[in-house]
Amino acid sequence: MSAPPGGAALPDIEACEEIELSALRAAVQRCRDQRLRFITITCMDMGETFALYYHFDEKLKMRHLLVHAPRAAEVASISDIYFAAFLVENEVRELFGVNITGMAIDYHGHLLLTEDNEPTPMAKVRMEG
Amino acid sequence: MALKTVIPFGPQHPVLPEPIQLKLVMKDEVVQEAIPHIGYVHRGIEKAAEKMDYVQNVFLVERICGICSFLHALCYCEAIEKLLPCEVPPRARYLRVIWGELHRLQSQHLWLGLFADAFGYESLFMEFWRNRERVMDLFEKTAGSRIIISTCCIGGVRRDISDEHLEEILQTLKEVERALDHSIPALLEDYTVRKRIVGKGVLTAEKAVELGAVGPVLRASGIAEDTRMTGYAAYDELDFKPVVETAGDCYARAKVRALECYQGIELIRQAIQRLPDGEIAARPRGRPNGRVVTRVEQPRGELLYMVAANGSQKLERMRVRTPTFANVPPLVAMLPGCEFADVPVITLSIDPCISCTER
């Protein structure tokens, strides 16, 4: 069960390890060292925080890392560990407004959105500024 | 001293029916770096799924991609069925395999034709697409529609396949197989074709895992991973072994997809042979509650859905990770070092589906 701040307690996905934001990169590095395949990141807007699921595959078994990032917190990119993460990190930043920094390729908010689009369309609470 | 030039490849290009752009940093005729750009046709379907009823979403997700519409619906329905929970009747599980494999078969034909067209082999393109029409006709007969067949529903399938139509599928598959026997050697054994695809766009097994490759791109690099091995639908009751090649080049990727046509035919035959009698759908009770991740194997590779529900009619979140989205970083790694003339063939070798990517 997971009860993130600002979110309801729901039965969570299986094989999910909840970690602190500060421990994210070290945990991802362990996944890389164990030769896990990076699948993707899922972001959920929980109000006060973003729930970020990092999905990995280990010989067709899934493993997930869950991080709760406060809205204004800086989330370090993992694209120097898993290059494949750069696309989804850009997407998460644009659509939700998660402050992901240090991406291997940074589209500066224009992977999917143009200047005419409203910012962070997937966020339930609009970021200011 | 050679100048570096940036060439925009796409978003409109003769070999790319859908819009993706690769900014190619060139030194003479050799690619130094490739930077992908998407976002030309993004539709916000994940957001739309939060606004609609969880049952209506089945029709929504089918529209993410016409080529693999059934598999999107299947992956989504499996997620909701786990959250309800709801047990799918055995006949429905087998019917899901039959329609799912027919989708794979037509999709691989579509790609084989486009791939032949990418290096100018137009008659082979026509042969594959003519054969594909036989499969499309089966959709029309069994589901009443050729592209978005809408037969998958939460709890099972919406339509049954009659004995007469099952027999027709078996007869048609014999014709499809005969045509493949004729066309595939032209692709894999022709001297000129081999010159264009052998040794091009090599992705090693280590790089494939590191860069998150999926589907035929991963298996062509020697990794025996196919989501069907996890046993969703009725795959756990069928004899199944993934098609694997080791060279990791365009030829290996073409060969995996070509052999997967035969594999799909064999799986459909097994499913028809073992198709049990009984109900085709269970009646779902209650509303989905909780979070779940499901995966199925699309023709292009692993498709992932994460669904978060809170017991209401509407979902908190529906996340879709499509295979082309996963295969873009491997493509970016395949291109540096290749000649400009090989870019279309290498790009097409990941079977890019921008409709899926821009969900």
Image (cartoon, helix red, strand yellow):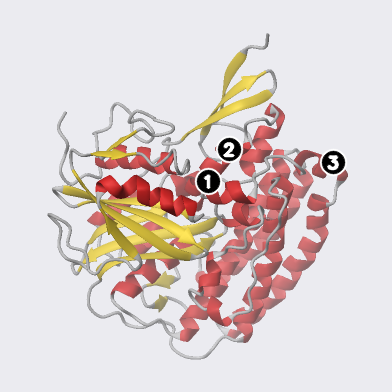
Q: Subunit of mark 3? A: B
Contact flag, marks 1 and 2 (Cβ < 8 Å): yes
Residue B79 quadrant: bottom left
Q: Specify the label residue B97 is tagged with.
A: none
> Farthest residue in the bottom direction?
B277
Asked whether, in this view, residue A114 is left or right of residue B95, the answer is left
Residue B142 in sight? no
Residue B241, x across and y down, in percent: 65, 71
Quarter of the figure with the C terminus of chain A: top left
Q: How many marks?
A: 3
> Of the residues under marks 2 and 3, which one precedes in the sequence?
3
Q: CA distance from mark 2 to mark 3?
A: 25 Å
Helix, strand or loop at label 1? It is loop
Location of residue B38 (image quadrant): top left
Q: Give the residue type that dot 3 points to.
A: Thr
Q: Label 1 vs label 3: CA separation? A: 31 Å
Quadrant holding the N terminus of chain A: bottom left
User: Of helix, strand and loop, which one carries label 3?
Assistant: helix
The location of residue A52, given as percent across then percent down, is 29, 51
Tell me which residue sits at (39%, 43%) in the image: A88
